[in-house]
Image (cartoon, grey):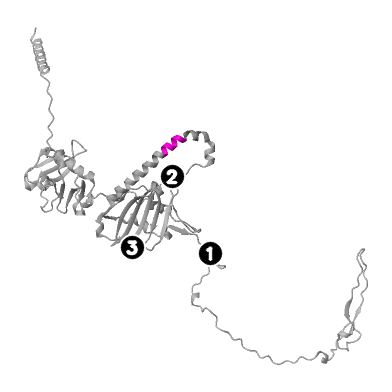
Amino acid sequence: MNAKTLSFLAFLTIIVIIAAVVLTQPKTTTAPLEKTLFFPNLQTSALNEVTEINITTQDESLTLMLTDKQWGLKEKHHYPVALEKVHNLLFGIAGLTILESKTSNPALYSKIGVEAVTDEDAQSTLLTLKNAQGETIASVIIGNDRTAKIDSTRREIYVRKQDDKLSWLTLGNLPVEKTVADWLEEEIVDIDGDKVRQISITHPDGENFLISKASPENKDYQIADLPDNASIKSPYTLRSLANTLSHLNLDDSIPASDIKFAKQQTHRAVFTTFDGLEITLFTMKKDDKHYAQLSAAYNPDMVWVEPPKSDEEGDDEEEPAEEAEPEIVAVQDETDDEPEVDIKQQAETLNAKFKGWVYELAAYKVDDLEKKRNDLIEREEPAEEKPIVENIDIEGLEDLPLSMPQFNMPEFNMPEFNMPQLDSIPPKQFEEDDAEEALSTPFSFSNVKVEKPEELPTPVGTPTTTNETMIPVP
């Protein structure tokens, strides 16, 4: 063997040894980083003890309190808040996990938003949870946040415990509403407009009219007792009225004891659905704000029942209808009982929610309710007669007098003229070329005689007549 071959075999041996060592090593796995909760004491049992939540910023402070199993806003006379938002907040703070520690230098707190809320121009939020005894369960200053790099569905949130100098970068979702309006349960009631059978509107002056449609399938509403020459001005406006209770949200809530509805300012609208639910809505405008008060009831007389098919429709398929009759009756009996129970319960639930409250509403939700019947209809006026003369420029004619001044006709005195008598006129002497003598006798009808003209031949079959002509006698 030469030196070159020995070198190659030595190199190959080293490679085999290294491979053997690697392959014979036991397999190891890297343990994942352990998730450390920021509040390890906030387990389910601890969360169930929370009865008060304080949220404080430099501009506003609000308190959520649990009373009679209902979370309410203290600043709004314990008006109910959105329960889902409360749950998201509590589970969000309990689920925060630590990513890494950050600064403990107070001078750098403002860089990540974890300065004290009392500091000048502070952007932080102080969140405090308390139990029924008023003891603090957890308290944290919440700073800036951003979308998490490892999970886009969560946030990276800077936090610091109020009594700790060290700040932390955590991972989780912690939605904190910072204003009173954001916590109020906005939706008052939600009744689909297609379910509304009729609306009875009464204005402060006593005017009352009814808007209704015949069946749930109908889209357009009609106004009762319209004059013969009237029609609906805008079907859209009537449909908009029917949708008044659809997603009816509040702008604010006020205790009913703080606002009185004056009769001379109150509009009343009763919405009745096809399943018998009646919602009465009182509205009033005061100080450029629109206030509303509601109540609910169940009216079984207004439950819509589909009319039976006509005899002509039944004759076409009389035998199949008889066979299916038992099944139809059974289904009808079952559905008759369900709406009555459900709607009664719905009315009771709504009344419990409405009781003791007045709501401030947006103007667009109630403006149409204040319209009179004449605002919703249009009348066909009789055609006007066209003037005989058109396109006359009458500019300046308005200065003319309405009557002409009296005009006195001047009297004309004609000179007296005496006509001579006919018999006293002397005979006029004249000559004619063919006359032998001049007329010497005055004209008189007594000198006229009748002469017969020459007889003309009479056509055959024509009766013979005599024509006489008066000629003067010379």
> What is the magenta range?
325-332
Instruction: Report, in whole angstroms, how far the alpha carbon at label 3 lies from the one at label 1.
Output: 43 Å
Q: Is residue 327 magenta?
A: yes
Instruction: Report, in whole angstroms, how far the alpha carbon at label 2 lies from the one at label 1.
Output: 48 Å
Regarding residue 93, the answer to whether it shows in the image is: no
10 Å neighbourhood of mark 1: few (<14), some, or many (≥20)? few
Q: Nearer the viewer, residue 126 or 41?
A: 41
Instruction: Single out the mark in the foreground, 3 or 1.
Output: 3
In the rendered structure, find residue 305 and report the number of the disc placed on it. Answer: 2
Q: Are marks 2 and 1 in contact (CB under 8 Å)?
A: no
In the rendered structure, find residue 117 and report the number of the disc placed on it. Answer: none
Q: Nearer the viewer, residue 249 or 438?
A: 249
Q: Are marks 3 and 1 in contact (CB under 8 Å)?
A: no
Instruction: Single out the mark in the foreground, 2 or 1.
Output: 2
In the rendered structure, find residue 384 and report the number of the disc placed on it. Answer: 1
Is 309 on the left or on the right of 243, as rendered? right
Label 1 residue SS: loop
Residue type at mark 1 is Glu
